[in-house]
Image (cartoon, grey):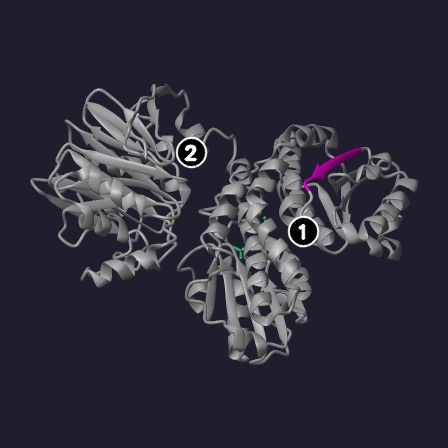
Amino acid sequence: MCGIVGFTGKTQAAGFLLDGLERLEYRGYDSAGVAVLNGGSFGIEKTTERIKNLMDKTDGGSKLPGTDGIGHTRWATHGAPSYENAHPHTSSSGKFAVVHNGIIENYIQLKDELKADGVNFKSETDTEVIPQLIEKYYEGDFLSAVQKAVSRLEGSYALGILCTDCPGTLIASKKFSPLIIGLSENANFIASDVTAIVSHTKDILYIEDGETAVITPDSVKLYAADKSEVKREKSVINWDIAAAEKSGYDHFMMKEIMEQPAAVAQTVDSRIKGREIVFEGLKLDAEMLRNTDRIEIVACGSAYHAGMVGKYVLEELLRIPTNVDYASEFRYRNPIINNKTLTVIISQSGETADTLAALKEAKRLGSHTLAIVNVVGSSIAKAADDVIYTWAGPEIAVATTKGYSTQLSVFYMLAIWAARQLHSAGSERIERLFDELVRLPELIERVILNEPQIKEMAKQCGDPKSLFFIGRNIDYAVSLEASLKLKEISYIHSEAYAAGELKHGTISLIEEGRTVVALACYEQLFEKLLSNIKEVKARGANVIACAVEGHTEVASEASQVIYIPRTDPLLLASLEVVPFQIYAYYVALYKGCDIDKPRNLAKSVTVE
Ligand code: F6R
């Protein structure tokens, strides 16, 4: 997600801000900016290029004199990457400047309210409502205006705020987005992660959700939402820069695995209004859905695997025939599609060359195109008729984890939303599914708790010549993803098979000691999968199984079993993929592989 820095001190602010933003570059960003308070007004500079460009524009910061400042690296969510949408954002009078990390879910309602008061907006961001709201409530008391404004915000935020009336005061506030306060002798700082400040101080004050901090060069006061003062001891961290970038994890991949509950929550919660699912600005509507006689899902790699799960979910709930294809195949196969086909394009990066070409081909043939994309303003997002963003935040590890998980959650939301429009599934089923969807982040957290067991299993895996993943239905779709995760980072050959296909050839490869990972979570086909497990076991396979809690009978067939919580079968993929992301990670770790940058692979495949 976005990066925030803030400074109030006895020395110049700009140098600290630019240095901090440079240290946050690793998180990924599409634009950046700084605001420094000087003599009753803000000096502001922004860029849609690299931080280096911001440094050049400000002559290393010297063109922005002043001892109070805020800075930001933006990862676009609302509004494309542009100069206007880059932070800091100011209020109409220019009295308040704000940097924000997070998503304001009720920004449209707040924007309408402020517009009715005569406020003009300069950007398309959700953030801009914040300085405008603070200005609305300001009657000479900076803290009180901020507290009133944040009490109106729904969603997530970490904020750094300055006011031209209050030199020497930086206000910070936080809810569901990371923010810390750094303490030093001649200045105090804020940052969205330790990386930005660790070279200046190791003394940290943690600010909790719902709290607001009033920070001056030599004091910090914390206030709870009810305005009472909060006392908290400082903490001392002993991370170096490399550890700080990864929030203490050894690799981005593990950090991103662990971020999945939050990424799924961010993607889902911001679309839920009461019991409704709302996709702001979606052109696809009930009439278009009624006119749709086929859905084509097109993507590459893991996004294709998410699409396979999407096929099961959409067909089950919408009863519309759904096909999934690799973008590289789709674009050259002269697909039979027309204006009754809905084409769903999936891409984390939004830049995959084959996927983009497939999207253009679908459009050319008259299909309505809906893209599920993580990177706002990317080529695929711009080219599609409709976009639903996954809000996973920047994904740095080459092997996708939270990108895939958030793609799944968009499919669930899309299917529930469309089934409600079409009345194509029983309302009781849909309501139960909706309840389970809301619980997903908590259920993923529970799966993550199995990490020590999975780590131990990975240790025992060693470096086999080959292994197999099998499953049926959604379990099969997850097998493909689990197998890809393992092979791409550990370089161990692995294959995923629809379990019923084993007998048609592949079973000849099963021999004494061969590991077969059996995904047996899909309840309706559990017995059939159990038979497949018995078949491979009878031929000497060492079986590792994954089953839902309660299906203990699998333990008598498998050498090891990972249990996942029970949920609606359509949501299973989100839970059962997690153990195998962790498994792949540790197998690769024990082999000494370069986990975040596996050989021959790139994060974004922009060539055919
Ligand atoms: C595997 C992986 C790739 C991508 C694929 C598509 O871990 O990350 O298979 O899923 O290259 O990339 P996007 O989603 O950016 O189009």
Query: Badge 2: how crowded within 10 Å, few (<14), some, or many (20+)?
Result: many
Q: In this view of the protein, can residue 90 be seen by the observer?
A: yes
Q: Quadrant of the C terminus?
A: bottom right
Q: Position of residue 532 (x, y in %)?
A: 86, 48
Q: Position of residue 338 (x, y in %)?
A: 58, 80
Kind of residue at disc 2? Glu
Identify the magenta region: 560-565
For residue 168, which quarter of the picture? Answer: top left
190 or 115, nearer to the observer? 115
Q: Quadrant of the N terminus?
A: top left
23 or 314, nearer to the observer? 314
From the viewer's perspective, is residue 349 above or below residue 165? below
For residue 179, which quarter of the picture? Answer: top left
Query: Badge 1: how crowded within 10 Å, few (<14), some, or many (20+)?
Result: some
364 or 90, nearer to the observer? 90
Q: Is residue 39 left or right of residue 469?
A: left
Residue at image position (73%, 39%) is 549
Q: Which mark is residue 568?
A: 1
Residue at image position (45%, 47%) is 393
